[in-house]
Image (tube, helix red, strand yellow):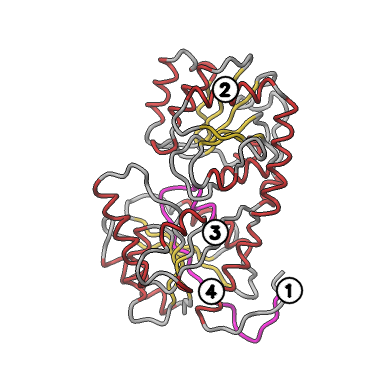
Amino acid sequence: MIMSTHRPLRVLQLGSPAGLYGAERWILALVKHLAPEAVTSIVGSVQDQPGPEPEICQYAARQSLQTQVFHSHGRMSWSAVGQIKRFIRDAQIDILHTHFYKTDLLGLLATRGTDCRLVSTPHGWSAKAGLKLAAYEALDRAIFPFFDAVAPLSQDLYDGLRHIPGLSGRRLRLIPNGVDLSEVEAARAPAPGSDPALPPGRFVIGYIGQLISRKRIDTLIEAFARAQVPGKYLCLIGQGPQREEFERQAQALGVAGDIRFCGYREDRLALLKGFDAFVLPSELEGIPRCLMESMGAGVATVASDVPGCRDIVTHEKTGLLFPLGDANALSACLERLAGDTGLRRTLAQSGQRYVYEKYSAASMARAYTELFQTLAGARPLAGVA
């Protein structure tokens, strides 16, 4: 329980309209665990294309949260800046919390001339960005010294930012990523044979996330094709622009019949609990939510040996790591897990313990509450549980 004479701080979370992926679910997990006595959350998004309301706002509304959609004419627009500025003033927003280069830049412009404090949480950078995207991300890092606080969610991201002039010290705050373990606990695996994504009697290898190049699904499909695992089956949950490319790859390798592309699934956590192994072959991550969810669900986990993944997975202790892009090494990991149930059980149990000890959303929310209160000049609230 939180007791205070101050009104709750009003915090606008400005997310992406692209879909409900790791960063958007991160925002929703944070908002869920922020104590309402301390923080009133509004979930917003900047919509730059015609269509239905952004998914993050739809989901937040179903959770009885206030939402706000700002409309941008193109990727960047002064109209959106004006809309956000007016909303900040009319709704008496104390903190604007942004999460991507676009919302970072819009937020910086919109908060100028207001009393609203500005916080950014970088979620990671593109490994093989094109010239335009690389320029936007470089601009994003360049404007961080003008923010009231920047709170990267992993040590690797923090280390990459602390050398920026004007950003060191109290302005830069490491707040480790967290996952809503209550959602993981509440999920129930489908009954055997009730969902074609989890065929009975098969060794099910799973992935949850976007079907985009930096996730390196091509490495996973190639490793799956090579793996000498009886009854192997690959379940890919998520959508993205490269789905057709990956489907063609599966056909070419002769394993299309053993791979199911599920698209977006609301019940992803229930399906996750039916996996025998979870794989994240990505080339770039902050601290990946999907790994925390899989480990929290007690599923043996395999990940590429890159920053972010290795922050969570310790090889042969909380999971298995393989060199980025090495399909042979990943195939060997899958064969080990399929052939050694004792190892699979040990890694699943130790990974679950580690995530529960280190990466709860409740702990992350406490750290953000303290940051918001400090920036707003509020007296620290006692009794944060």
Tell me if label 2 and label 1 are in contact, CB under 8 Å: no
Q: From the image, state whether disc 2 or disc 3 is nearer to you.
A: 2
- Give the residue displayed 52% in from the left and 63% down from the top: 174
Q: Which residue is at the front of the view, 56 or 351?
A: 351
Q: Amino acid at mark 1?
A: Met
Q: Taking 321 as reference, is 363 left or right?
A: right
Assess whether residue 4 is covered by the magenta stretch.
Answer: yes
Distance CA(mark 4)–CA(mark 3): 23 Å
Tell me if label 4 and label 3 are in contact, CB under 8 Å: no
Q: From the image, state whether disc 4 or disc 2 is nearer to you.
A: 2
- Residue position for label 4: 372
- Residue position for label 2: 332
Q: Which residue is at the front of the view, 132 or 155?
A: 155
- Return the x and y of residue 44 as percentages of the image width and height: 45, 62
- Residue position for label 3: 61
- Give the residue displayed 43% in from the left and 72% down from the top: 118
Q: From the image, state whether disc 2 or disc 1 is nearer to you.
A: 2
Tell me if label 4 and label 2 are in contact, CB under 8 Å: no
Q: From the image, state whether disc 4 or disc 1 is nearer to you.
A: 4
Q: Secondary structure at mark 1?
A: loop
Q: Secondary structure at mark 3?
A: helix
Q: From the image, state whether disc 4 or disc 3 is nearer to you.
A: 4
Please tell me the numbered disc located at residue 27. Answer: none
Distance CA(mark 2)–CA(mark 1): 50 Å
